[in-house]
Image (cartoon, grey):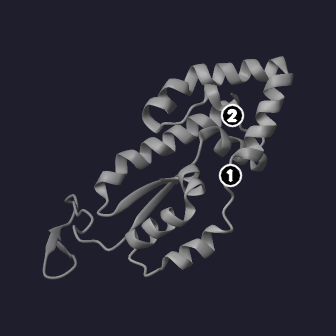
Amino acid sequence: MSVPKTGAETVSQGSKLEQSQPKRSRARFVFVTRHPLATALSTQKMVPSLSLFDLVAHWLAVEEYAATNAPKLAHAKRVALEDFAAAPAATLLDLWAFLGLDATRADADAAAAAVDGDPNAKHRDAYCAAARTDPRKARDHARLAERYGALVREHHDYDLAGWCA
């Protein structure tokens, strides 16, 4: 017995349907990343029951998933939030071109005016102030950097240990 598929093709019932993404898909994927501690601290405000260790481990898992799957996509781009904040107009022009959108430098400059130049400052300042004054938090930070620091630095170019430096 056959089950109809798109077009004139048919597939025998019970067989594995191995259809991949069309080679010329118009879909565009933008993966936005952020420093894992800033991401963890921001998330922890919404879900206080999760530890920073759990949240950084989750960040690593998501980053690995994105890195593994991006090559399978016809059009994928990765943008670090910190890079966007440092050069918002240029980043917007690049993203808009990637997405196939028409835009001018004036459009990008106007949008860039609202961008915070250091999106991690509030999380970093509070976290690091606590780590400097509370020995337990300082130990927790050192343990977090020891456990995940090399992996984060090597594969994602973020620094855990030096975040408070």
Amino acid type assigned to the residue bearing label 2 in the image: Leu
Q: Is residue 16 left or right of residue 40?
A: left
The answer to whether residue 49 is visible is no
Q: Is residue 111 left or right of residue 69?
A: right
The answer to whether residue 17 is visible is yes
Q: Nearer the viewer, residue 160 or 28?
A: 160
Q: Nearer the viewer, residue 149 or 93?
A: 93
Q: Is residue 133 above or below residue 89?
A: above
Amino acid type assigned to the residue bearing label 1 in the image: Pro
Q: Quadrant of the C terminus?
A: top right
The residue pinned by badge 1 equals 119
Residue drawn where x is 56% and y is 62% of the image: 88
Q: Secondary structure at mark 2?
A: helix
The residue pinned by badge 2 equals 52
Quadrant assignment, res 121: top right
Q: Position of residue 102 (x, y in %)?
A: 43, 82
Residue drawn where x is 79% and y is 26% of the image: 131
